[in-house]
Structures are given as C-alpha cells and as structure tokens.
Image (cartoon, rainbow, N blue to C red):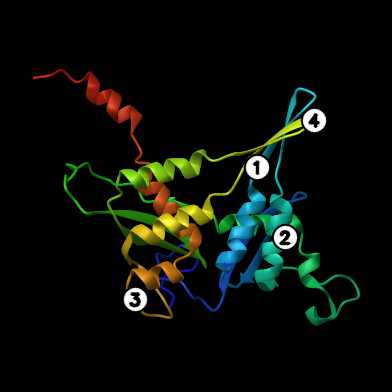
Amino acid sequence: MEGTGNREQGTAVTFELNPAEIRMVLPLEQGGRKYRVTHFVRRPEYKELLAFRAAFARTMERINGAAVWSDCREAAAETLWNAIALRVEGYTLPEGADSWEQILWRELVPVSHKLLAADLFQRIGIVKPEIEEAFPLGQKSQTVYLEVRRDGLIYSNLAHVLREPGTHHLKEFRRINDTVLHVGGSRSDKTIFPSHLAELCGLYDELIVRVEGYAIDGRAPGDALEIAKWMDALHKEAAVNALFTPAVMIEDAAAGESEPRQ
C-alpha cells in the first residue's frame, strides 16, 4: 500500500515499487493562463527507461568549425508518455467530441506537457545530513538516503544500504562516466555522450545489501536479488551516484582551514 499523508504536502511512509498507477499533478502557466492538469500513468518498465535515457544522450557535432549540440528528448518523452499514460484530468474535450472514447487523447496532449511529466520521474533528491560526525573506518557498508515526490506525497525516508565499494568499483564507476563515443567523417566530427543508466544499475545490483522505506505489493522487499529486480532504475542511478561521488562542502572546508591550530 502507498504511504499515508495529505495530498501535495504529506510525508509518505513507504514507496510502493509496484503501484497500480501513479498520479502526477502539473500546475501550468501557459499563454497567460493558469491550468492544473493531472496525468495518471503506470510505472515505466526498465527497458522503457533505458530507451528513454538513450534518446536523452547529447550529441556534439562540429560542422564547418561550429559546435552543434542536439538530443532527442522531446521525441523520447512523447514515446515514453504515450506508452505509460492511463488517463488524464483537467483537460476539456475538443469541439464536437462528447466523450474521451471518441478521441485519440494521447495524441492531443501537448508534447510540452508530456516532457514535463517525464521530467518528474527524474527528480530524485539526496537527503542532506543535518549534523557532522566522525567517519567510521573499517565499515563494510554505507547508507544513501533519497527523497522523492510522487502522487502528491513526499517520500523522505528512502534508505539504500550498499557494500563499501572497492578500488575496482571506483575504477569502473569512473570508466562508465568517462565513456564518450567519437564518430569521424570526411565533413564532420561527432561526439556522443551516451546514457550510463544500464551500467550504473549494474553497479547498484552488485553492491546493494538492503533498502528501507520501500514496499513491493504492500510488503517489505526481501533479499538483494528481489531488490535488484524491483527497484526503480532511476533510484538505483541516484543511489550509486551518491555513493561514489561524496559531496565536499567547500565553504565549510574553507572555514575549517582558517581556524587557528592549537
């Protein structure tokens, strides 16, 4: 079951990994007017997210000395949204139509709305600690805390416990993020910055120990294999990035260096 809380403001208890549907509210300002539309979608499948992110890959092509950047995010968002959309609210029927069954409503929803809805799937935050503490040497695992908004609720208790990465894991993470593709030609030179979602999910599956704050059909997830099977791919990506790229608080570090030594 979904966690309880007040719509748009409440804090949820558990994040359901296999929801019957996902409710996405989009407050919009467009053409000098305000709108509030709601999209109901199913959970995207892993292969759909891979295709979506692959189309988001940026390409830089040099043509006559000029750098031209491009991607296919609009087409990718439309393809994903058309596949997962269940129904919409907050829209009026076009003139002459008496019911939603009479129209191809998926084709009529503006692409800009589909792109906004697709972007909501990728808004996963890292919960920042409130206090400083001594780092425990010799620990066998680290915990990453994520915060996600979905269905009008805030899920701020999502914990991923992962094994402490070794040198080979760090090397693999760097290799993944440094990978670019170069395609040379007689008239242009193209550089492709591919999606790394599949590789980062692979690292997550190798390192995950357990999770907290999640549910699968209303029950707590079991072992690491079940977590790897059901965990949202974008949550995997966020957790791995947080694990391998510890944030340094530059201002705090500078303040610490300026303090007189005893």
Whether residue 14 appears in this view of the structure is no
Give residue 179's position: percent from left, percent from top.
54, 41
Give the residue pinned by disc 3.
Answer: 220
Q: Is residue 107 left or right of residue 79?
A: right
State the residue lying farthest toward the left.
262
Q: Disc 3 vs disc 4: which is toward the camera? A: 4
Give the residue pinned by disc 2.
Answer: 78
Identified by mark 2, the residue type is: Glu
Give residue 138's position: percent from left, percent from top.
16, 48
Q: CA distance from mark 3 to mark 1?
A: 38 Å
Camera-nearest residue between 233 and 26: 233
Residue density around tag 2, few if under 14, some if 14–19, many if 20 or more, within 10 Å: many
Q: Disc 2 vs disc 4: which is toward the camera? A: 4
Q: CA distance from mark 4 to mark 1?
A: 21 Å
Whether residue 52 is situated above or below residue 218 in the rendered picture: above
Q: Quadrant of residue 20?
A: bottom right
Identified by mark 3, the residue type is: Ala
Whether residue 190 is situated above or below residue 92 in the rendered picture: above
Give the residue pinned by disc 4.
Answer: 186
The tag earlier along the polypeptide, 3 or 1, is 1
